[in-house]
Image (cartoon, helix red, strand yellow):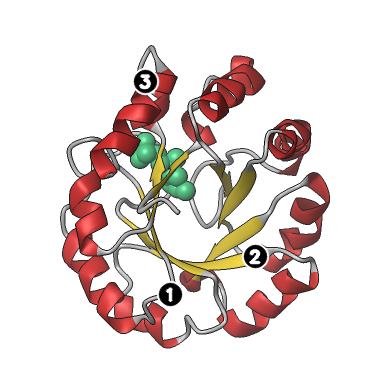
Amino acid sequence: MRTVEVEPSLYAADFSRLGEQIETLMRAGARIFHFDIGDGHFVPPITIGPIVLESISPLVHRLGGRLDCHLMVEEPQRHFEAIAEAGGDSVTFHIEAVRNPAAVARLARQHELQVGLAFKPETEPEEAAEVAEPFDLVLCMSIEPGYSGQPFMPEALPRIERLRGLLPVEKPIQVDGGVGRDNIRLLRDAGARLVVAGTSTFGRDNIAQAYEELVQEAA
Ligand code: DX5
Ligand code: ZN
């Protein structure tokens, strides 16, 4: 098992060449793709959704990969069925978007989806840790959710450390936002196990090399 799994974030991909870029990254070793669904309410932009997921999931699954869906939406439960049908493998929704995280996690599992709990920079890690028991992972945002390409918020590092101390060792911490070669090792050392990389993967001419360099840096 790898120490840190680097998940390319498709939000930063070139959508005119989406399948080709996915294949390139899978040949370079990527196995989990991060797929950002934004509804224009919980976050300002409308991003991508089940229709795009449906067109890429056969390719990703055929090559042995998984699609990790980050729901930056209000009422995330309304979308679980469509995401499962489109080939999503997991859904991570925000603690700030729901009243009863455990109940919403149960709804996700009814669709055989794995489930993660995300929290924004203004939410205390303690709040997420308190309700993390039914979740497969906890996602600590290192930017304000909404857009790719924002700078990493350095205060995320002590927040990840605090969260790591609060969760059982086997519960993975995911980090999303501004991850790159300059901070991936610090994130690993702070306790991150899954790191999302949008611009630091797709913002380079050679995306396979960008991915490989992130993996090497975190090894
Ligand atoms: C933004 C999304 C992120 C985004 C990260 O709200 O949740 O997953 O794609 O992009 P980078 O890695 O460029 O910050
Ligand atoms: Zn995301």
Q: Amino acid at mark 3?
A: Gln
Q: Amino acid at mark 2?
A: Gln
Q: Secondary structure at mark 2?
A: strand
Q: Amino acid at mark 1?
A: Glu
Quick one: label 2, few (<14), some, or many (20+) residues within 10 Å? some
Is residue 124 in sight in this rendering? no
Note whether ligand 2 is within 8 Å of mark 1.
Answer: no
Which residue corresponds to mark 3? Answer: 209
Question: At x 30% / y 54%, what residue is drawn?
Answer: 142
Quick one: label 3, few (<14), some, or many (20+) residues within 10 Å? some
Earlier-in-chain disc, 2 versus 1: 2
Question: At x 42% / y 20%, what residue is drawn?
Answer: 207
Q: Would you place residue 69 above or below residue 96 in this image?
A: above
Q: Secondary structure at mark 1?
A: loop
Q: Quadrant of the C terminus?
A: top left
Q: Quadrant of the N terminus?
A: bottom left
Which residue corresponds to mark 1? Answer: 170
Q: Quadrant of residue 16?
A: top right
Earlier-in-chain disc, 1 versus 3: 1
Q: Position of residue 139 (x, y in %)?
A: 42, 62
Which residue corresponds to mark 2? Answer: 114
